[in-house]
Amino acid sequence: MKQRMTNYQRGILEILNVKLKNEIDDWLLEGMAEPMRTL
């Protein structure tokens, strides 16, 4: 039971990590595009 729970939690953490990584990538791309526009 405990093992199943940790696998479940690990799956949630992986999903959150992927979402966070995608948001950071979007933020970085926007952040890099922003100075380009002002130049």
Image (cartoon, grey):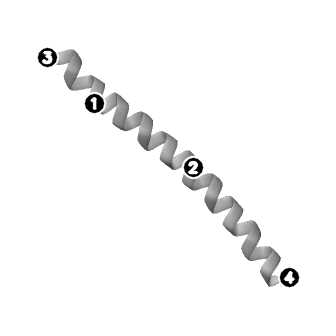
Secondary structure at badge 2 equals: helix
Label 2 – label 4 distance at C-alpha: 26 Å
Q: Which mark is residue 1?
A: 4
Q: Does label 4 or label 1 sit earlier along the sequence? A: 4
- Give the residue type that dot 3 points to: Leu
At x 79%, y 83%, the residue is 2
Whether 18 is drawn above or below 2: the answer is: above
Label 1 near label 4: C-beta < 8 Å?
no
Q: Give the residue number, with chain letter if any, for mark 3.
A: 39
Label 3 – label 2 distance at C-alpha: 32 Å
Residue 36 in percent (x, y) is at 21, 20
Q: Does label 1 or label 2 sit earlier along the sequence? A: 2
Q: Which mark is residue 18?
A: 2
- Give the residue type that dot 2 points to: Val
Label 3 – label 4 distance at C-alpha: 58 Å
Q: Give the residue number, with chain letter if any, for mark 1.
A: 32
Residue 13 in percent (x, y) is at 62, 61
Q: Does label 3 or label 1 sit earlier along the sequence? A: 1
At x 36%, y 31%, the residue is 29
- Give the residue type that dot 4 points to: Met
- Give the residue type that dot 1 points to: Met
Secondary structure at badge 1 equals: helix
Q: Residues within 10 Å of mark 3 (few under 14, many from 20)?
A: few
Q: Does label 2 or label 4 sit earlier along the sequence? A: 4
At x 57%, y 46%, the residue is 19
